[in-house]
């Protein structure tokens, strides 16, 4: 799932941004 630095999807830049936010949220969430 790791993308290279500066990766930008030409068609879904906002979607990629939201995806990164969701991934950061999962990383911050405690493991149950």
Image (cartoon, helix red, strand yellow):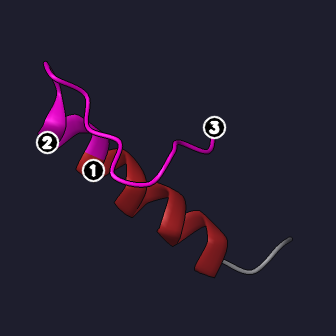
Answer yes or no: do the residues labelled 3 and 2 have beta carbons within 8 Å?
A: no
> What residue is disc 2 on?
14
Q: CA distance from mark 1 to mark 2?
A: 6 Å
Answer yes or no: do the residues labelled 1 and 2 have beta carbons within 8 Å?
A: yes
Tag 1 secondary structure: helix
Q: Left or right of 25: which side holds 15?
A: left
Measured along the vertical axis of the image, is residue 6 above or below residue 10? below
Q: Which residues are magenta?
A: 1-16
For disc 2, the neighbor class at 10 Å (few under 14, some 14 to 19, many from 20) is few
Counting from the top left corner in percent of width and height, residue 3 is at: 52, 42
Task: Look at the image and tell me in which quarter the C terminus lies.
Answer: bottom right
> What residue is disc 1 on?
18
Q: CA distance from mark 3 to mark 2?
A: 17 Å
What residue appears at the point 60 percent right and 65 percent down from the top-left corner?
Answer: 26
Tag 3 secondary structure: loop
Q: CA distance from mark 3 to mark 1?
A: 14 Å
Q: Earlier in the sequence, mark 3 or mark 2?
A: 3
Counting from the top left corner in percent of width and height, residue 19 is at: 37, 46
Q: Dividing the picture into quarters, in which one does residue 9 lie? A: top left
> What residue is disc 3 on?
1
């Amino acid at each position: 799932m790791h993308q290279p630095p500066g990766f930008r999807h030409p068609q879904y830049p906002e979607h990629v941004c939201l995806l990164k936010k969701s991934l950061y949220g999962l990383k911050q969430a405690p493991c149950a």
